[in-house]
Amino acid sequence: MLKCSLHDGNTLPPVGLGVWQASNREVESAVDCAFGHGYRLIDTASIYENEAGVGRALKNSGLPREAFYITTKLWNTDQMRVQQALEESLTKLQLDHVDLYLIHWPAPSQGYFVDAWKGLLAAKEQGLVKSVGVSNFQPEHIQRLQQETGITPVVNQIELHPLLSQPELVDWCQKENIAVQAWSPLAQGGAGVFNSKTVSTLSRGYGKTPAQIVLRWHLQRNVCVIPKSVTPERIRENIDIYDFSLSKQDMKAMDALNENRRLGPHPDTFVNV
Ligand code: NAD
């Protein structure tokens, strides 16, 4: 999988740089480093409060607009003010459009996500975003969007890592032609994944780092990834995952690490930080 085709005719780079919990200053050098190693996609969000740093990095890169792919997200408390929230993001990013705009969480108890979706569709009509998608949506949330607007999101960005592999949700999205993108693909660098027996053994066997084994497992499930790092060596390593493939048996061994263990909140109940 070198590029992921979206059902709106656009494509999504399979590996991007996540920038949650990175300061504006850290983001500037991380983005610069990532571009140097062949990344095109940067994944930010208004709630990360680092869109301005991403914007400065884009400007300083001197790259033409079509050379990079920017995702940002609509925060929960902005679901009734999509147009203004998007304009604020674009101003900080110093862009006239983003490539992918996501509803960050359904926050179903607010009762606004269908209206928010209509706002995203309007923004797409206006050319302010190229593709529109969702994050942390369960099938029933997506079905409501489909019923009320007839339009299916192109991407669902969800928590996915070896401890939470969500096979049913991944299958459901893929059958609906929705590209699945993993957040916290490395289980946030902890939770015992890297030093588990399975990952350590595969790491030695393939001569790849534990992070590379985990990211390769995602790609072979047809899941796109946005690992976060601000460390140059890790940024390089996290996209250097195209020169090997895990055998069927080793994919199964990775699948067996699933513990249905979330590191983040549950999409049915999460509303605000
Ligand atoms: P992640 O799984 O990408 O883990 C990042 C951490 O792993 C780093 O801070 C570092 O400690 C470690 N790490 C990174 N590369 C490594 C390497 N090569 N070797 C060893 N350790 C390494 O976690 P994340 O930041 O939570 O998720 C990635 C991105 O997903 C975020 O930055 C953000 O862009 C996005 N995200 C989205 C949502 C959402 O609700 N849509 C939620 C969380 C994160």
Image (cartoon, helix red, strand yellow):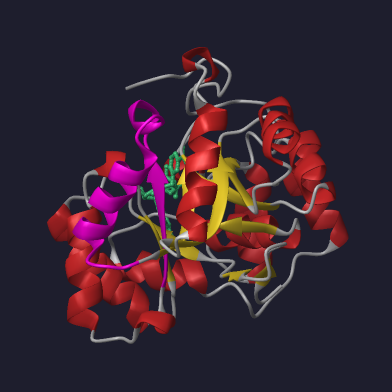
Closest to the observer, 191 or 226: 226
Closest to the observer, 182 or 255: 182
Q: Can see residue 35?
A: yes
Quadrant of the rendered structure where residue 60 is?
Answer: bottom left
Q: Residue at x 20, y 76 (%)?
A: 59
Q: Is residue 117 above or below residue 209?
A: above
What is the span of residues highlighted in magenta in the rendered image? 69-96
Q: Is residue 236 above or below residue 159?
A: below
Q: Quadrant of the N terminus?
A: bottom right
Residue 109 x %, y %: 51, 12
Q: Can see residue 256?
A: no
Instruction: Assess whether residue 94 is covered by the magenta stretch.
Output: yes
Residue 115 x %, y %: 52, 31
Q: Is residue 15 above or below residue 217?
A: below
Closest to the observer, 249 or 230: 230
Q: Residue at x 35, y 73 (%)?
A: 34
Quadrant of the rendered structure where residue 158 is?
Answer: top right
Residue 77 x %, y %: 34, 26
Left/right of residue 215 with respect to residue 16 in the rendered view: right
Q: Residue at x 22, y 44 (%)?
A: 49
Q: Residue at x 79, y 50 (%)?
A: 174
Q: Is residue 251 above or below residue 63?
A: above
Which residue of the protein is positioned furthest toward the left in this rendering?
25
Q: Quadrant of the C terminus?
A: top left
Closest to the observer, 249 or 103: 103
Left/right of residue 108 with respect to residue 42 in the rendered view: right
Instruction: Assess whether residue 109 is covered by the magenta stretch.
Output: no
Left/right of residue 87 with respect to residue 155 in the rendered view: left
Residue 173 x %, y %: 75, 44
